[in-house]
Amino acid sequence: MLCSLHDHTPIANAKPIRTADYSVELQRSGPAVLPALYHNMHMVMVCLSGRPFVVRSNGREERATPFSPGESSIHASGPGDRVTWPLGMHCLYVHLHPRLVRRVGQSVHRSSSVVLATRHRLQDVVIRDIGLQLYNFVSRAEFAGDRDVRDLVLALAHHVVVSYAGEEPATPHIGTLSIEEALDAFREDTLDWKGVSALAARAGLTRSHFSRRIQALIGVSPHRLVLGSRVEAAKHLLSRRDTSLSEVAYATGFSDQSHLTRVFKKFSGVTPAAFRASH
């Protein structure tokens, strides 16, 4: 999920479509960065309206030229360099889980040892056309059905694997867990602090060693990953108008509504009430 920077205008997204293997979402404005929870997901971006953007690389900022509508980029999984988009970018994002890419690679190349290679400024009509079809679904309140979205995502995954796949690099590990498995646990579950200790035990590490390894690999502590996971879960519940803010807080592991509001604003730049209103 794309989230706003702390001190800038928040993003107003259409409701994303998510499964365990992929997500499809529309970013209507910025600025934004990709949360660490999604660094182990491949990302395919299709630009809908072009504006300048900033690439942060090794602590430096390099302003790039504007994208043109229809241009696309592929960002391979892993921390790497991340892009910061300014206010006004309008893009469609498809996040592909590496296991989905491996399954497609097995069917295409008879090998699951494939990974997408990062590519920028692609003039790829297949990515553009599939992206625009997905845009039609995600920008509507109701869409034809999950199967239609899934078929389009699989077609996109097949195309990018055939056209842009490379050899899979060695996967960083945190004890006995791969970084992919560890981030999956944070993203797919709303862990509590005991859950982090249990995850460290699964990795065969003490909690302090586990925390240092996470921090070294992705630059974010388990504490922030837990809070980030809870905020992401809260965003899903906030799309339901029949759920009160206190109920959202309780369901996502916050002590009360004020605790949810403080953490939510720190991570997303807006209060839960403002986030709900923007959707």
Image (cartoon, grey):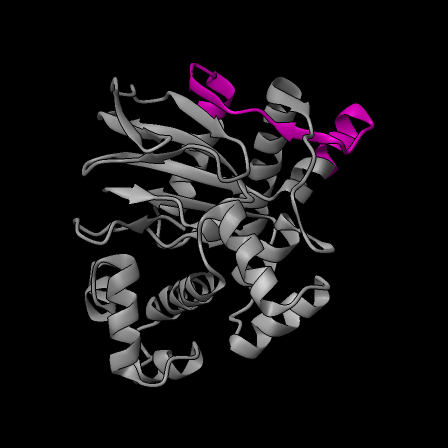
Question: Residue 271 in magenta?
Answer: no
Residue 94 appears left or right of 235: right
Residue 159 appears left or right of 56: right
Figure quadrant of residue 51: top left
Residue 173 seen in this snapshot: yes
Residue 105 appears left or right of 47: right
* Residue 252 location (% of width, % of height): 43, 76
Quadrant showing the C terminus:
bottom left
Front residue of 278/165: it is 165
Q: Residue at x 78, y 24 (%)?
A: 109
Q: Which residue is drawn at 48% across and 39% down?
A: 94
* Residue 59 location (% of width, % of height): 32, 33
Q: How many numbered discs?
A: 0
* Residue 192 location (% of width, % of height): 51, 76
Is 162 situated above or below 6? above
For the record, the magenta segment spans: 103-128
Question: Residue 110 in magenta?
Answer: yes
Residue reaching furthest to the right: 110
Is 140 situated above or below 90? below
* Residue 251 location (% of width, % of height): 43, 80
Residue reaching furthest to the top: 123
Residue 19 seen in this snapshot: no
Front residue of 126/9: it is 9
Q: Residue at x 32, y 79 (%)?
A: 242
Q: Which residue is drawn at 38% across and 80% down?
A: 254
